[in-house]
Image (cartoon, rainbow, N blue to C red):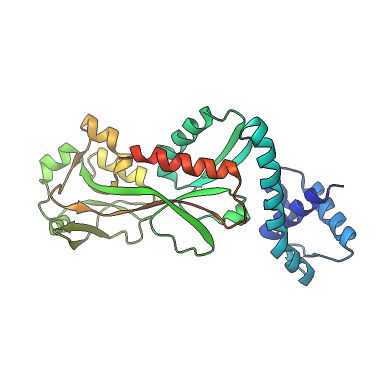
Amino acid sequence: MDIVDELKAFVATARTGSFTAGAEQLGVSNRLTSKYVAELEARLGTRLLQRTTRKVGLTPAGEDLLARAPAVLDELDALLGSVSEGSRGLSGIIRVSAPVTFGEVYVAGMLARFAEAHPDLAFDLRLDDRYVDLAADGIDLAFRMGVSETMSLKTRKLGTFHNSLVAHPDYVKEHGAPRTPDDLSRHACIVDTNRRQPHRWTFRKNGEEVFAQVRGRFHVNSARAAIELAAAGMGVAYTPRFAISDLLETGRLVPLLENFEMDEGPIAAVYLEVRTLPRKIRTLIDFAAEDMHALP
């Protein structure tokens, strides 16, 4: 049996806490994953996992192997990938994570543009507004918006996203347009609970920050949902500009408080710290950094 398959089965099982989850991550059967781990234990002459009815845990030997095996596998993948890619171009699968709205509006299209130049690559795009565990979920690269507090990941800033304050023209006609952030206390504000401070919207003027405490009938955990509600005339939305450019062009939404600067934040690529980042991942990051110049 190939020791590489055995190590991959062990790492996936140890990281996810079960043979079933490890098998799903590897795309093989539960029985085969268990068999690989058992054969690795027999090869090493020691038990690596403590089996229980609910999950598996690590023995001291397993903890030691888990601390070393991922780096070995990464180095091997990078070595084989560089030889293969050098003769055939980029190949294999790239597992990508991104926030839902950003993934739908931008990342999917960016990957399609990248894929045109690399026909032997396959992609697994997983959209989730929570910060996924890259190691446990087998993610090669994640796109994140805002400041990340995860110190164990490598980060490369790709660009900046900007926010806009918008509403439907009929809403503005009926309720009037706010002239200052303080006026928002008298408006129906659509609150995106994915924001770090959902009820506190930030504006700047002449270098000074101005904060507005907002409230409204609608609380949603999706920027796309907030935009759709605003476009339906349900209130005012504070939302990423990249997600509304088409609605601004068609007039379904109009910008408000244009004499104020809106909040902004970084867009970054994050990945696990490894000795050698696979060339296909490096190439995708470089492409995204260049492609993102066109983001509104």
| Residue at (65% x, 36% y) in the render | 85
Is residue 164 or residue 173 the one in the foreground?
A: 164
Q: Is residue 239 left or right of residue 141?
A: left
Is residue 25 or residue 216 the one in the foreground?
A: 25
Q: Is residue 201 visible?
A: yes
Where residue 120 appears, x then y in whole percent? 62, 30
Vertical side of 273 occupied by 111: above or below: above
| Residue at (34% x, 49% y) in the render | 160
State the image quarter where residue 37 is shown: bottom right
Where residue 103 appears, x then y in whole percent? 44, 42
Is residue 259 or residue 49 the one in the foreground?
A: 259
Quadrant for the C terminus, please: top left
| Residue at (35% x, 44% y) in the render | 225
Where residue 15 appears, x then y in whole percent? 67, 59
Q: How many marks?
A: 0
Is residue 45 or residue 34 the one in the foreground?
A: 45
Q: Is residue 217 left or right of residue 268?
A: left
Q: Is residue 95 visible?
A: no
Q: Is residue 136 left or right of residue 58?
A: left
Where residue 49 appears, x then y in whole percent? 78, 64
Outermost residue toward the bottom? Answer: 60
Q: Is residue 85 left or right of residue 177?
A: right
